[in-house]
């Protein structure tokens, strides 16, 4: 595992913890759909299915992680959500929501984890 993938995995672990602390149930992590892509975290928030994109950055290195979901990325996430639903027996009664968790790792101090609901 290289440093970049280790950073991403650490961010996803922090994101899953944040979602659980918010009362959500993590159903699956790193769900892959062939060459189409990957859903970082699939969770349940009551009767809503949540497809969660996680972006992790070191402070000052790149754009803020919350700015990382472009319209193209949002469209890809919607398509992946549809594929996940099809592969797992249909849509839940509460529908589907796409969330983003941004993790910033500062040079000093603990990580900053932000959760934005319904980004796409």
Image: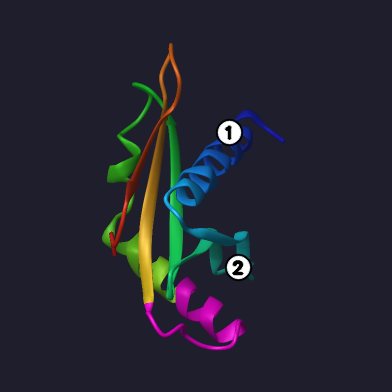
Residue 20: % across, % down? 51, 50
Marks 2/1: CA distance?
20 Å
Residue, disc 2:
35
Q: Residue at x 29, y 65 (%)?
A: 120
Q: Residue at x 47, y 58 (%)?
A: 24
Q: Quadrant of residue 32?
A: bottom right
Q: Quadrant of residue 79?
A: bottom left
- Determine which of the numbered discs, if any, sits on residue 118 in the image: none
Per the rendered image, the range of residues in magenta is: 80-95
Describe the colour scheme in one phrase. rainbow
| Dot 2 crowding, Cα within 10 Å, few <14, some 14–19, many 20+ | few
Check the picture and name the quadrant holding the N terminus. top right
Q: Circle 2 — which element?
A: loop
Residue, disc 1:
4
Q: Is residue 78 above or below residue 20?
A: below
Which is nearer the N-term, disc 2 or disc 1?
A: 1
Q: Is residue 78 left or right of residue 8?
A: left
Residue most extreme to the top: 108
Q: Residue at x 52, y 81 (%)?
A: 85
Q: Is residue 39 visible?
A: no
- Which marked residue is nearer to the observer: mark 2 or mark 1? 1
């Amino acid at each position: 595992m290289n440093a970049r993938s280790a950073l991403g995995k650490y961010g996803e672990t922090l994101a899953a913890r944040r979602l659980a602390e918010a009362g959500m149930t993590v159903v699956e992590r790193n769900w892959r759909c062939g060459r189409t892509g990957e859903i970082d975290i699939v969770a349940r928030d009551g009767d809503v299915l949540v497809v969660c994109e996680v972006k992790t950055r070191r402070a000052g290195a790149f754009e803020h992680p919350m700015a990382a979901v472009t319209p193209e990325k949002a469209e890809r996430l919607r398509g992946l959500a549809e594929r996940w639903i099809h592969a797992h027996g249909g849509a839940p009664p509460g529908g589907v929501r796409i969330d983003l968790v941004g993790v910033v790792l500062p040079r000093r101090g603990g990580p900053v984890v932000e959760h934005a609901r319904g980004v796409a």
